[in-house]
Image: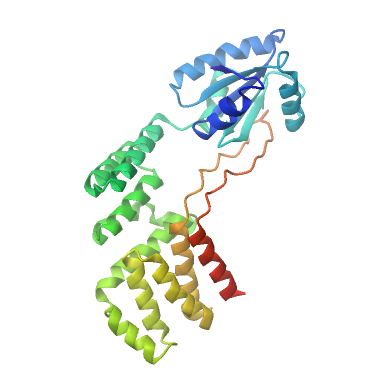
Amino acid sequence: MTDITLKNFETDLIQESMRQPVLLDLWAPWCAPCRTLGPILEKVERDYGGRFKLAKLNSDDQPDIAGQLSQAFGVRSIPFCVLFHQGQPVDGFVGALPEAQVRQFLDKHVPSEQELEAEEQIEEAGALAAGGDPDAALARLTQALATDPDNDTARGEMVTLLLQQGQTADARAAFQPMAARAIVNPRIAALGHWLSAAEAAPKARSASELGAAIAQNKRDFDARFALAQLHFAAGRFTEAMDELLEIVMRDKAWSDELARKTYVAILELMTKPAPKPAAPAAAKGALEVTGLAAAVESDPIVDGYRRKLSMALF
């Protein structure tokens, strides 16, 4: 538990919430409901074992901060609690809720023990892969999925690593449990495009044969797309997009916009994933709070290829 002041508001609340969810409790010593809620929050923080951090702000000692928060959220009574994640307020509640309702509120936003363990294993897998040990990375991702079977991040990283290692059949098997979610998840859909390219590559003509066909007829879109797929399968993303862009510039609607869709899929794979969105607030007594999503770090290569596609389309 941390007491928030003007001096540590940025570091211990905003910056800390980039690392883990932080629940801010606005209270005052004279407030009877605050004295009821306070011990409940402290107990729950202990029980959750580091899955979130509790921060407290004494509205009498810190009237400037308390006043600004009250005005921002349209709340004039205490206690009121606001959950911060990724530097932004994502949900909150007013009043001394019983412990069961506090836990219900937190469980909408705070990762489970299994999710936290899986996230650690995913990070370890990334470090192992970056260090040149893909087999150990795959073993760690297997552990992550055993810990949290519904973790699409772990499954997506496994598919990616298997494709990079040329293990296409294993990649297909790893992909299947999340294939249905491709309709609503662009990253899963993008992995599906990559997997299809990898499966098509062994049956395709050679790059030199495809290049010769394109040289004879620049509108041989079947050959150009096949060449793009070869590049895509091998992880040569920019080379693949160069070929796909040639198709889009000449015929945007070719093959039900397949070239454009594949190009967009590659951009998705090259883009750093955004932080997970917080669950929507819906409970009675919840604060209606909004905040900007955490910014995704810009990549000049990705930005450049996005501009190229925009120019080709418009």
Q: Residue, x 51% and y 43% (percent of image)?
A: 276
User: Where 193 falls versus 72 (above or below)?
Assistant: below
Residue 199 pos. (x, y %): 29, 68
Q: Is residue 274 shown left or right of residue 166?
A: right
Residue 284 pos. (x, y %): 66, 30
Q: Which of these two is toward me, 196 or 237?
A: 237
Q: Residue, x 50% and y 14% (percent of image)?
A: 43
Residue 210 pos. (x, y %): 32, 83
User: Where 138 falls versus 263 (above or below)?
Assistant: above
Q: Is residue 239 shown left or right of residue 60?
A: left
Q: Residue, x 36% and y 40% (percent of image)?
A: 123
Q: Is residue 53 shown left or right of residue 282?
A: left
Residue 188 appears in view:
yes
The residue lying furthest to the bottom in this view is 216
User: Where 293 falls versus 179 (above or below)?
Assistant: above
Residue 93 pos. (x, y %): 65, 26
